[in-house]
Structure formats: structure tokens, C-alpha cells
Image (cartoon, grey):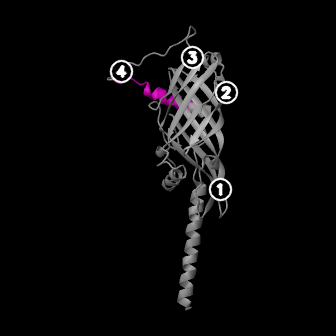
Amino acid sequence: MTRRSVMFIAAVALLAVGVGGWLALRLVDTDAPDAVSTDAALSQLEEATATSATPEDDDEPQPEPDVDDGGSVDALATWTVDDDIGEFGFDNASGSFAGFRVEKSFFAGGGATAVGRSGSVGGEIVIDEGTLSSASIEVDVTAMESDDSGRVGAIKDAVRADEFPTATFVVTEPVALDTDALTAGETVTVEVPGELTIAGVSRAATIPIEATIVDGGLGLIVGSVDLVWANHGVETPESRIATVADEGVLEFQLVVRR
């Protein structure tokens, strides 16, 4: 091998190491959006409703929500997921969304949190006296977004979005709920049993949620639960620079309206 060939190979190797290291650092430095929380969601929703409340000349008057004798919005109702209020953005969402978080470990060292979210969510929740009677939530996984365009394709491939474009959660039994506290504007925490379907595979899941009623006849539901990908037949994407954890977190933020 000539000296020129040796020098060329060494230069290519150094370039590969440099590019790989830069790519790993770029991924490590990528800031994932914060995990869902009721406080953050309430703050964002308050800002969004304040902005949307600004009257326009051609605005139609909005119907007033049902209130009890004390002026609070009654929790006893059928609540529908509202995909019009607020905005959906990967980094900052004041509207409804659902998605996941998963940890990545890089062979070069360090790690990062990969996040995917869909703002295309629908469904309804029925609340009777002292009970969350039923609920059904649907998420369009073909609308999944991330901070990395390459990651979006990997996500959709992993959950087989072409074959199973919708993920669902359906409550399987009524749940006791402090509807008086909810009507009074308090945040109520409850564990909800149901059937979670991802990539066409259904599994029993109990999801802790926090529910709050806010001004204007809107409600907010925030929740998350640990998820084992293999339980739903999801194969974690493979990479030459990183490994993806076998477990992740399913999370959601739902704005609902009576």
C-alpha cells in the first residue's frame, strides 16, 4: 500500500469519527419538551383561551356552559376532546396531544430523550354522579411529530402506522370519581383501567390521570404511564450510534369540552 493510500484512509477514518461524534453530540444536546404536567398545561391553556377570547367583528357568540348554583361548571356531562382550542407544537402545546418519551443511549457516551407527539386526538369521556362511567380516546399516529424528521419515519415504521393508523384507549369499567371536588375546580387524581391498543395489539393498562375543570366550560386531563414496547409488538428502531430503551412512557394532554 502506498503512502498516499495510507494517508487517504487515515483521513477518511478521522472524518468518519468526527462526523459521528458531531452527530452524537447534536442528538445529545437536543432539548426534549418537558413531560406533561397539570400546572404547565393549565398555564398554557389559560394563555390560549385568553388569546382566543379577544373578540373579532365577525365572531359568532359562543354558548355559555352549564353552571351549578355556585357558578361552577358542572362536571356531570359527556366531555368531548376539543382539537380546536389552543395550538399544537412539538415544543409547546396548549391544545390536545398524545405521544411517548423514550431514552436513547449513545455508543459514544451520553444519552438523550426521544419524544414523539400527535396533535390529532379525538374521543369522549362520560361522567355521572361520583363516577367516570366510560371513555374512549383515539390518536392518529400517522400525524406523529418529532424534533427530528428522520425520527418521525422510524416512529411510524415501529408502530406500523400504515397498517394501524390509530391508537386507542378505552375504559373497561366505571371508576369512582370525586365529582363534587371536580365541579368545585379542584384537580382530581384517579387511576383509570382500560384497554390500550397500539400497532393493532391490545393490552390491559391502568393509567393515572389528573382532571381539572377550568373557566369557560373546558376541562383538562393529563396523564402518563410506563410502556413496554414489546407488549404491543413494537420493535424499537435500531441505530449504528445509539440504542433505544425497551420501555418508554406514554403521555397525553387532553382539552375537553362539555
Is residue 52 found inside the magenta-colored segment of the image?
Answer: yes
Q: Where is residue 73 in the image (x, y as percent from the top left)?
A: 55, 16
In the shown orientation, is residue 9 left or right of residue 180? left
- N-terminal label among 4 and 1: 4
- N-terminal label among 4 and 2: 4
Residue 76 marker: 3
Q: Mark 1 points at which residue?
A: 111
Q: Mark 2 points at which residue?
A: 189
Say which quadrant the N terminus sits in: bottom right
| Mark 2 and mark 3: Cα distance apart in space | 17 Å
Q: Where is residue 228 in the image (x, y as percent from the top left)?
A: 66, 47
Question: Crowdedness of circle 2 by 10 Å Cα count: few (<14), some, many (20+)?
Answer: some
Residue 60 marker: 4
Q: Position of residue 67 (x, y in %)?
A: 53, 12
Disc 4 to disc 2: CB gap under 8 Å: no
- N-terminal label among 1 and 3: 3
Give the image quarter of residue 189.
top right
In the shown orientation, is residue 227 left or right of residue 9? right
**Residue at image location 47% in from the left, 45% down from the top:** 142
For marks 2 and 1, give the one nearer the viewer: 2
- N-terminal label among 4 and 3: 4
Q: Label 4 sits on what residue type?
A: Glu
Disc 2 to disc 3: CB gap under 8 Å: no
Q: What stretch is highlighted in magenta?
A: 42-56
